[in-house]
Image (cartoon, rainbow, N blue to C red):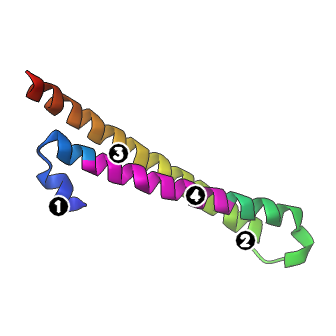
Amino acid sequence: MKVALKTAKTSEDHQRIANYYQEQAKKLQVKEKEERDLANYYLTQPRMHGKQYPTPYENHEGLTGYYHQAGTQALEKADQQLKTAEPAHTSNLQ
């Protein structure tokens, strides 16, 4: 990805990079949902897991936050690439 970012020149290059980030965001959103589901399950079963720290709920809730933040960042990077691709695309039309 570092090479692709450094060598991107055309709007198509930036569109491909944006597509990559959008796919990453989708995968991260799926992981976020899985972790949220697990956190909710452990929240309803507090006695089943003893007194360990962090609790399974806290662990999965933390991962939910991580995947949410990473997915948001991937979407922001995709937006940046799309904005970069747009002027190149409109200048090619003139």
Is 5 magenta? The answer is no
Cα separation between marks 3 and 4 = 18 Å
Residue at image mark 1:
3
Callout 4 environment at 10 Å: few (<14), some (14 to 19), or many (20+)? Answer: some
| Quadrant assignment, res 84 | top left
Name the residue: 26% across, 44% down: 15
Residue type indicated by callout 2: Pro
Pick the quarter of the image with the C terminus.
Answer: top left
Q: Position of residue 18 (x, y in %)?
A: 31, 46
Disc on the earlier residue, 3 or 2: 2
Residue at image mark 2:
54
Q: Position of residue 26 (x, y in %)?
A: 49, 53
Callout 3 environment at 10 Å: few (<14), some (14 to 19), or many (20+)? Answer: some
Q: Which residues are magenta?
A: 16-35
Disc on the earlier residue, 2 or 1: 1
Disc 4 element:
helix
Residue at image mark 4:
30
Disc 2 element:
loop
Residue at image mark 3:
77
**Viewer-side residue, 80 vs 53:** 80
- Give above or below for 49 relative to 13: below
Residue type indicated by callout 4: Val
| Mark closer to the observer (1, 4) | 4
Cα separation between marks 3 and 2 = 32 Å
| Mark closer to the observer (2, 4) | 4
